[in-house]
Each structure stands twice: as structure tokens, then as C-alpha cells.
Image: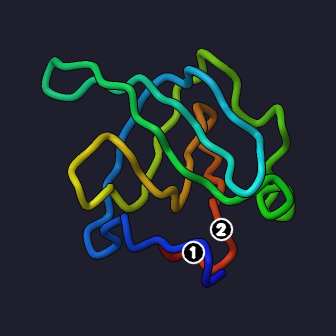
């Protein structure tokens, strides 16, 4: 865990975004979700960093859990630099299922 720092993210104030999945990169060492998110009338592409595929599979995810076009809500720690990046804590799917992004539940 030490070599995968989360210092770039501010875990003190959780952020929640809702958007449309553009693509999912199911890769090591971290999977990524790209979302189109509209806030205050402005659309932005968000990059959501996740755990790697093996860790996600242990939490109930599969490669098919998210598909382009799905609407999801993500809660996590926003990038400290204010950019449209987030470290995922959980994802709520359109059917209201909530999936954790890592076992400890923290950011």
C-alpha cells in the first residue's frame, strides 16, 4: 500500500458526483472510470481512480459491472489541486446497488 499514495486526494471532505460512464479502464495497478458529469450547467470529464481489478473482484465487481452509457453516483475524495479527479470510495449503480471501491471503506 505504501507505494500507492492517496496524498493527491483530500479525504477530509467526501465529494459525490453523478455522471454517465464514458469508459472503464480495467487495468493494474488501478482501474479508472471516466465520467461525464454536469454541475451547475457545465459538463466536465471526471477521472475516478479505483483499486486494481483483483481487489475490485473481491468486493463483488466484474469487468462488466460498469458499461459506457450507465449513469452512476460516485462518492470519494476529490483531488487536492481542484481538478476533476477523484479517489473512489463507493459507486451507486442505477439499480441502487452500492459497491465499495476498497475493503477498508476509507479514502
Q: Residues within 10 Å of mark 1 (few under 14, many from 20)?
A: few
The x, y position of residue 99, in whole percent, is 65, 54
Dot 2 falls on a residue whose secondary structure is loop
Dot 1 falls on a residue whose secondary structure is loop
Residue under label 1: 105
The x, y position of residue 12, in whole percent, is 28, 75
Is residue 68 placed above or below 34 in the rendered structure?
above
Is residue 17 placed above or below 45 in the rendered structure?
below
The x, y position of residue 57, in whole percent, is 85, 56
Q: Residue at x 35, y 72 (%)?
A: 11
> Quadrant where the N terminus lies?
bottom right
Position of residue 43 in the picture relative to residue 5 (left or right): left
Q: Residue at x 82, y 32 (%)?
A: 64
Q: CA distance from mark 1 to mark 2?
A: 6 Å
Label placed on residue 92: none
Q: Nearer the viewer, residue 1 or 104?
A: 1
Marks 2 and 1: in contact by CB < 8 Å? yes
Q: Nearer the viewer, residue 54 or 104?
A: 54
Q: Residue at x 51, y 74 (%)?
A: 5
Q: Residue furthest left?
A: 40
Is residue 18 placed above or below 40 in the rendered structure?
below
Position of residue 46 in the picture relative to residue 14 (left or right): right
Label placed on residue 102: 2
Coloration of the structure image: rainbow
Q: Residue furthest front?
A: 3
Is residue 93 placed above or below 4 in the rendered structure?
above
Q: Quadrant of residue 15?
A: bottom left
Q: Quadrant of residue 18?
A: top left
Position of residue 29 in the picture relative to residue 63 (left or right): left
Amino acid at each position: 500500500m505504501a507505494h500507492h499514495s492517496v496524498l493527491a486526494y483530500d479525504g477530509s471532505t467526501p465529494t459525490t458526483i453523478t455522471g454517465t460512464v464514458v469508459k472503464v479502464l480495467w487495468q493494474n495497478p488501478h482501474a479508472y472510470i471516466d465520467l461525464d458529469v454536469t454541475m451547475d450547467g457545465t459538463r466536465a470529464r471526471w477521472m475516478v481512480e479505483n483499486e486494481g481489478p483483483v481487489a475490485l473482484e473481491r468486493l463483488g465487481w466484474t469487468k462488466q459491472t460498469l458499461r459506457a452509457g450507465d449513469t452512476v453516483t460516485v462518492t470519494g475524495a476529490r483531488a487536492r489541486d481542484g481538478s476533476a479527479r477523484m479517489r473512489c470510495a463507493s459507486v451507486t449503480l442505477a439499480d441502487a446497488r452500492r459497491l465499495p471501491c476498497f475493503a477498508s471503506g476509507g479514502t
